[in-house]
């Protein structure tokens, strides 16, 4: 029997669901964004309920993927156009800071 997500888990899942296509966050970034928990706690939430959100957009801080799904995760990220530095995601370019994208204004 699957448990219902805790308040913390719901906040984590909502945060991950907001990560735009082509951008990523680390587990620690997500914890900081929701203002609670740790990278490990976020990882636990993702392990239990992550399939409900774009889980592939959450990585280790160094741009590497979880070992057990790394090939699949890398394929998904490449499909979204996430920038890479070798075999890792280029976190300096791809990291989302949690702010909504600012629409570009067209010249008038």
Image: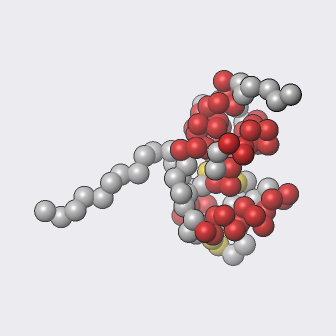
Which quadrant of the figure contains the N terminus? top right
Instruction: State the image quarter where residue 79 is shown.
Output: bottom right
Residue pictured at 69% horizontal, 61% vertical:
63
Left or right: residue 99 versus residue 37 is left
Residue 74 at x, y percent in the picture? 71, 66
Q: So how many labels did they put on this image?
A: 0
Q: Residue at x 52, y 53 (%)?
A: 20
* Quarter containing the C terminus: bottom left
Figure coloring: secondary structure
The answer, for residue 26, to whether it is visible in the render is no
Residue 62 versus residue 14 in the image, above or below: below
- Across and down, in percent, residue 41 comes to 76, 35
Image height check: is 104 above or below 6?
A: below
Q: Is residue 4 visible?
A: yes
Query: Residue 35's image quarter?
Result: top right
Image coords of residue 11 (percent x, y): 62, 31
99 and 22: which is toward the camera = 22
Q: Is residue 98 above or below residue 37?
A: below
Q: Residue furthest bottom?
A: 86
Residue at x-position 68% and y-position 42%: 52
Looking at the image, the residue that sits furthest to the left is 108
Up/down of 97 relative to 73, above or below: above
Q: Estimate the x, y position of residue 10 in percent, counting from the top left.
A: 65, 30
Q: Residue at x 35, y 51 (%)?
A: 102
């Amino acid at each position: 029997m699957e448990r219902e997500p805790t308040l913390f888990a719901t906040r984590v899942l909502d945060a991950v669901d907001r990560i735009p296509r082509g951008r990523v966050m680390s587990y620690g970034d997500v914890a900081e964004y929701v203002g609670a928990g740790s990278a490990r706690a976020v990882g636990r939430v993702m392990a239990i309920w992550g399939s409900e959100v774009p889980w592939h957009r959450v990585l280790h801080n160094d741009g590497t993927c979880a070992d057990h799904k790394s090939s699949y995760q890398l394929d998904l990220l490449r499909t979204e156009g996430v920038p890479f530095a070798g075999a890792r995601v280029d976190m300096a370019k791809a990291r989302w800071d949690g702010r909504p994208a600012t629409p570009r204004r067209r010249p008038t």
